[in-house]
Amino acid sequence: GRQVGTSVRVGVGFDLDSFKTQSVRSAVNVREGQGVVLLCGAPPHSGELTFAWIFNEYPYSVQQDSRRFISQETGSLYIAKVEPSDVGNYTCVVNNTVTKQKVLSSPTPLVLRSDGKNNNTFSQDVPVTVFFGIHLSYISLLLQFPFPLFLTNKILKLAVIIKTHWLQTITDTARSIEENLFWECKANGKPKPSYSWLKNGEQVVAEVRDSGMYQCVAENKHGSIYSSAQLMVLASAPSFSRSPLKALLKARSGSEVTLECKPQASPPAISLWKKGNEILQRTERITLLPNGTLKIANVTKRDAASYTCIAKNQFGTASATGKLLITGTTFSVNARRICMYSLYS
């Protein structure tokens, strides 16, 4: 069947405006050992952007390491546990990946405070985007969760975004015709993903009954993920070609005999047993199991006969026959010896 993947939006026009004219941005004051967020605030644009930061002056760029992280979603620069060597001017570099156009922000001074007060001031509320996985751990360390944060004059708006990922997927399955099928897929993400189902690339309608390629789609506003599996619907008449009944089965008198009826059939066949031409019924000694197995307890010479298993479904009928031979027991032989001994004693 046909599978589909994530759709791609194609746009025309890839513009990148310049930053608003400003000689120097407001200084950011931070104590040694604290974490800090330097906002890029990309100008109006269309097309995909990448971000970098210059430290003091070109070509000294900020290198990401265990303390420094540049978000390629917002352009913000995160510095964990500020050191004296971090003091300086930081300039955000915005690059349009299509046109290769670059624009630079005004420098943002980072100042190290020596007193115990925290006077960080921002001209706007600070949006912070946290991504699932390693970034979440990094920014938690950076911002020193739980609260209070180093930001005191404005509210920190924390928007947690968890990329959609599978918790449970679907797998290729074969089912007999008219047999029930239950497929479940589970995904996690923030915002919470919604689900839809596709069959051979088309939206699944209420009634699902044919073979095909099925896909579970989980999506939120940040993307879609697909889990695919093939469904094969089986329909066949009973057959004993792989599991024929044993042609001759020997059993001692007084023992229990088990005859198995295991035809291949889709849907599963209904089975019955015959002894000669007589259909067997359940008795105190005869047990007919739901899986088609026949059990005869405490067999005697009268149980010696040909036994036939007949399997039937809506696509056909098949049968298999085997002969049961009953032999004498050790106990009866010993009894005969005892009688002979008594006659000659």
Image (spheres, rainbow, N blue to C red):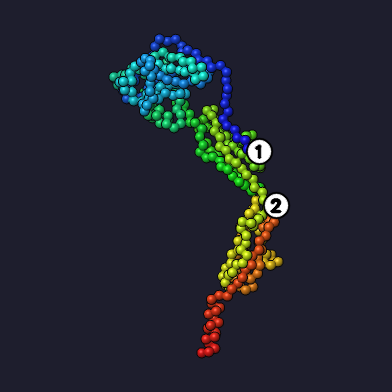
- Going by the picture, which residue comes out furthest to the left? 114
Mark 2 closeness class: few <14, some 14–19, many ≥20 residues within 10 Å: few
Distance CA(mark 2)–CA(mark 1): 27 Å
Which residue shows up at 44% across the image and 10% down it? 21
State the count of labels.
2
Mark 1 closeness class: few <14, some 14–19, many ≥20 residues within 10 Å: few
- Residue 283 vs residue 305, the one in the foreground: 305
| Label ID, residue 95 | none
Give the x, y percent position of residue 18.
47, 12
* Comparing labels 2 and 1, the label whose residue is closer to the camera: 2
Question: Is 262 above or below relative to 130?
Answer: below
Q: Are the residues at dot 2 and dot 1 in contact (C-beta closer than 8 Å)?
A: no
The image quarter containing residue 238 is bottom right
Circle 2 is placed at which residue position? 315
* Kind of residue indicated by mark 2: Phe
Which residue shows up at 38% across the image and 16% down it? 59
Element class at badge 1: loop
Question: Is 327 above or below relative to 104?
Answer: below
Circle 1 is placed at which residue position? 206
Is 102 on the left or on the right of 336, as rendered? left
Give the x, y percent position of residue 245.
62, 62
Give the x, y percent position of residue 2.
62, 35
Quadrant containing the N terminus is top right
* Kind of residue indicated by mark 1: Ala
Which residue shows up at 61% across the image and 70% down it? 325
State whether residue 45 appears in this view: no
Give the x, y percent position of residue 235.
66, 49
Which tag, 2 or 1, sits closer to the chain's start?
A: 1
